[in-house]
Amino acid sequence: MSSLSATLTQLVARSRELGADRTVCNWGGGNTSAKADEIDFRGRPTRILWVKGSGSDLATVTDASFTGLYMDDVLPLLERERMSDSEMVSYLAHCFYEPSRPRPSIETLLHGFLPFTHIDHTHADATNYFACARDGEQLARDCFGDALIWVPYRRPGFGLAREVALAVRANPQAQLVILAKHGLITWGETDATCYATTIATIARAREFVEARIAHSERTLFGGARITASTSEQRHAIAAQVAPILRGLVSAEKSQILRFEEGEDVLTFASSRDAQRLTTVGAACPDHLVHTKPWPLLVDWTPEQDSATLAAALRTGIAAYVAKYQHYQEENAQQDLDPDAATPVYRATDAASDPHPRVILIPGVGMFTTGKDAAMADVSAQLYRRAIAVMRGAEACGGFISLSDAESYAVEYWPLEQYKLKLAPPEREFARRVVLITGAAGGIGSALCRRVAQDGAHIVATDIDLPGAEQLAASINEHFGPGRAIGVKMDVTQEESVRAAFERAALAFGGLDTIINNAGLASVHPSPIRRLSNGIGT
Ligand SMILES: [Zn+2]
């Protein structure tokens, strides 16, 4: 029984440990495996490959996130020269040790074909400094010597797994594989040595590249092109334009926005090199479905006013959409599964909204978009990883990425799109932001829970801040992180109402619905009505 598999228990713990450090494992990226002798349903001992399922995140995996496959079924595939993606998926579906497990990772065969007991495949920042750099291969060799196998870029799948397996077979001294423009593979004969090797390899790459950065004459990202505004100014301008931006990126489907203003983000967005680097491409193939190949860098500086920024957002988004649609059209005839008997084109139901997912405003910060706050947060996290990778890669001869055709082949790869389809269907109030006044009271909190249950994001406002915050925390615990914020608001004070609207704009990008539930003793009209004009999306 899997629940008793000591190997699987160890693997879950190792995976979570790797996932806990986002510089090692970005969100949803990377996968781990272990091979073990288990007992099959007839009581016979059998060799099983435990590998992470598709679509889960290493940081939060449980034993149910892994799938066991019979090695006796997996290994003969290495004798084949090619295999289409659909063949691979249906073949692996026949190798399940236990039914009702998730579909195994799209990188399963990387694990299955290598002769090592424990394997980590990560997209660590530090090894991607090399993987995404013009001089990366040479510098990685300088760093790791002949322990390194460097595999040129090719899309994940059967072909890549086979190429890696043959390279390792031909280089028995190897201790790591770097997949160009993609990631790292490390291994060990025990769970502990595998983990230690992964961490040590990443640390060595980091040390090597950090030393280069320290000795470099170049300023980070070419230095500042503009000076970032103060935190207060940034918040004011971001809150002002967020609803406009949200309206613009929601032309096809309503989006939730997230605002990010970490130092890394501000430095990058305000730098001289941002203009060049934002056109290069993604820092890792698995970012693509969450960040698209490029962010939008808005053509604006803090010396200009918010009306100019609104206009720059309009022209910037329009230009981005045109560029993205051109990219879609240019690649529409690309065969996404070249080893299949008949060509495979982008599925008609594939998510293909042409609007940017990452919007950088120089001097102000970054907005990311998503169908909910959690997915907008994933885009933000991944783009921060991209900034980190670009910083290192720039010190290794310059950041490089996938070509447009390579990006498209991953972004619209049916196996990547499958991960997106694992999400449950959207509920009635999904993608909507609802502000409720008097939220901490009995009726208010019941209202909040009700609309949250229907998928809404909640701005729970009340004069009782601890009460509103407590409610928001409980909604987040129930319905997922980022779904609600608690805000102090006195509906009789215009300034207080304005501040609450700003918080909503920064947290979610704006409001769709207001439920004015707070009891008013005053006979004056609610200031909300006057303020709401132009604030919604
Ligand atoms: Zn990978």
Image (cartoon, rainbow, N blue to C red):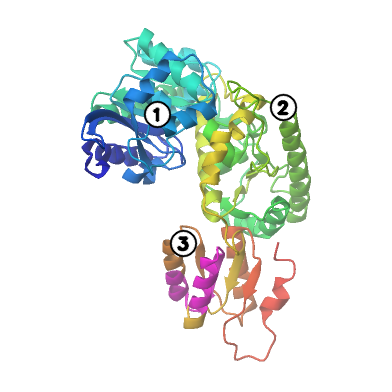
Could you tell me what secondary structure mostly forms the magenta stretch? Answer: helix
Q: Tell me: is circle 3 under 8 Å from ligand 1.
A: no
Q: Tell me: is circle 2 under 8 Å from ligand 1.
A: no
Q: Is residue 112 above or below residue 289?
A: above
**Mark 2, residue position:** 333
Quadrant where the N terminus is found in the figure: top left
- Residue 479, labelled with which disc? 3
- Give the mark nearest the N terminus, 2 or 1: 1
The answer, for residue 24, to whether it is visible in the render is yes
Measure the C-alpha gap from mark 3 to mark 2.
40 Å
Q: Which amino acid type is shown beneath numbered disc 1? A: His
Q: Which amino acid type is shown beneath numbered disc 2? A: Gln
Instruction: Confirm or deny contact between disc 3 and disc 1 (CB under 8 A).
Output: no
Q: Nearer the viewer, residue 512 or 419?
A: 419
Q: Which amino acid type is shown beneath numbered disc 3? A: Phe
- Give the mark nearest the N terminus, 3 or 2: 2
Q: Position of residue 230 (x, y in %)?
A: 59, 53
Q: Is residue 257 above or below residue 533?
A: above
Q: Nearer the viewer, residue 227 or 237?
A: 237
- Mark nearest the camera among 2 and 1 is 2
Q: Residue at x 46, y 66 (%)?
A: 475
Q: Nearer the viewer, residue 425 or 196?
A: 425
**Is residue 100 left or right of 408 when viewed as pictured?**
left
Measure the C-alpha gap from mark 2 to mark 1.
31 Å
Measure the C-alpha gap from mark 3 to mark 1.
31 Å
Q: How many marks?
A: 3
The local secondary structure at tag 2 comes to: loop
- Residue 121, labelled with which disc? 1
Question: In the picture, residue 339 is in which quadrant?
Answer: top right
Q: Which residues are magenta?
A: 444-471
| Badge 2 density bin: few <14, some 14–19, many ≥20, Cα 10 Å | few
